[in-house]
Image (spheres, rainbow, N blue to C red):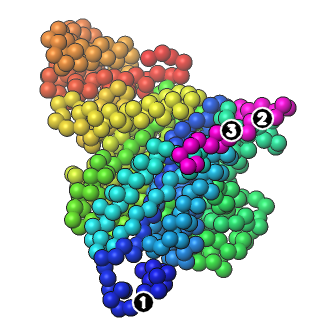
Amino acid sequence: MYLYHKANDSFSLPAVGDDGTQKFLLAAGDLSGIQPYLFDITNIGVGGAARRLRARSFFLTALTTGVAYKIIKHFQLPPVNILSKAGGNFYILLPNVPEARSYLDQLQKEINSDLLNGYGGDLAMHITYIPFAGKDFPRYNSVAANAREMLSRSKLSPFKDLLTQDGAWCENSFLLSGPDGNHGYCRSCRKLPVSTEDPNLCRLCLLDTKAGRWLTKVQTMAYYATEPELDRERIPLPGGLWVVVKSDKPLPADPLVVLAQDPTNIAHFPALTLDSYIYVPTDSEGNIASFDSLADQARGKKLLGIVKADIDNLGALFALGLGEQGSISRVSTMSRLLETFFGGWLPRFLKKHYPDAYMVYSGGDDLLVTAPWNQAIELAVAVREQFSAFTACNQDITLSAGITIVKPRQPLARTMIKAEEALELSKERSAKAAETAKDQCTALGETMKWKQVQHLVKEAFSLEAWIQDGILPRTFVQRLLVYARLYDRYSNGDPSGLKYVALLHWDIKRNLARQKQREPAQWATKLMQLENPSVRHLGFIGRFAQLLTQTTGEEG
């Protein structure tokens, strides 16, 4: 407010007390194209997929963080003016003065010029702003909703400020530089020319491999608006920004901000707490573990599980959950708490309890994790339990997840699409015998309510134990999958599916008649009860048990 009145030379008491004039500006920033950029590594055998995925995930967070701190540094504002910063977007409180609007327009153009020419146009930065008055602070929710709507419209025309002028196309702006006659395109991304340092990788993919090694043990990072005087462990960002990850050398002077796990260890510069926590599993030599080595930790078949999860109805939660109480302080506090859970606490929880889990990203309201396939399902259940405890078991704040099981060398883009599709099923398709969708998990072709998943997993492990002990043949699991398909046919309105009951009854009498098979026979007999939750999700139990008892190379 001081900067507004200073720019307008209006320090009279009536002017300062006027809460009807639009003195404030809410600046909103967001990145589009995140998923294509993050996962479009065409040849994962070049440069190490796990290491490079970590670097790309960090780049996205670093860019929005650096831009947010560059903005407040320009106006000499404190960090508290960054109202929220998570999930590739930020909201900043600024004075409503012409300089602010022109600065934001120019900053967006500068960043997008770098993204278009240096990054192939996969990513685009969108910065919008909306003025509001002091009386609007109690209804900040509405102001932020208007800003989000402006961002959504901006995303429909990325790079508009660079590709058009006076309503006409700037044709030359569509031309990007390609390789010269002696060099080809990058073997990994297939989009940019190879660098002079490496015959196979472009400069960005090469930087990914370097940054991926630096990020294994990051405790401190510092952001700069100009190139820092340091010859290593520095990462260039669009818009003239740089981020330095802590090395054994002193930090260069004049950082925009220093973020540290323990700010008390930072000398010479004031430091803020690094809310996000970077953790990736490493091998015995301290290198990021490969996807192959993660799959080797799986039980049974050596596969990976991709977990994608986010909060259900987050927009409605802010808009309707807080309702008329959606003030700037409440919305900002809620946003920061969610970021603390997903970006700070959850990675530490996974490191302690699931050390083989690879956190691709976690922040804002969502997460993406890669882990050995059996751990991925157990991990998803644990995350939901922890989130429920975090929200004091509020039944109106729920989490859904999608899990896909893949081979470790399957193309990243394809696996992430499958995980996203599974998540959408959790949000749109209600589980069998359930009245509503969401607050669910989809895995191995089944959508289930969270309270059912843990019990179903336990039953699959029981099947594995019976098979390993020689009590059951593995072919019994294959027959269970046949019965599961018949039950699904019945539940979808086809009465012929009911013949599974007779077939299962005959199977039990013929093949589970020995004394040592009494326990599995009792379990299987209960599957003939049509309302048994286990028979509703028998396909999940059977496929889970099948993977547990298979080895790599066997077909399921």
> Disc 2 designates what residue?
179
Tag 2: amino acid: Pro
**Mark 1 vs mark 2, CA separation in Å:** 59 Å
Range of the magenta residues? 165-187
Instruction: Give residue 353's position: percent from left, percent from top.
Output: 45, 50
Residue 435 left/right relative to 96:
left
Principal SS element in the magenta part?
A: loop
Kind of element beneath mark 1:
loop
Foreground label between 2 and 3: 3
Kind of element beneath mark 3:
loop
Residue 83 left/right relative to 409:
left
> Disc 1 designates what residue?
11
The residue lying toward the viewer, choosing from 212 and 16, is 16
The residue lying toward the viewer, choosing from 125 and 196, is 125
Can you say which quadrant of the picture contains the N terminus?
bottom left
The residue lying toward the viewer, choosing from 425 and 31, is 31
Instruction: Look at the image and say whether residue 167 sits in the magenta stretch.
Output: yes
Q: Is residue 386 above or below residue 327?
A: above
> Disc 3 designates what residue?
175
Kind of element beneath mark 2:
loop
- Residue at 38% across, 58% down: 147
Tag 1: amino acid: Phe
Disc 2 packing (10 Å; few <14; some 14–19; many ≥20): some
Disc 1 packing (10 Å; few <14; some 14–19; many ≥20): few
Task: Report which quarter residue 324 is drawn in.
Answer: bottom left
Q: Is residue 123 visible?
A: no
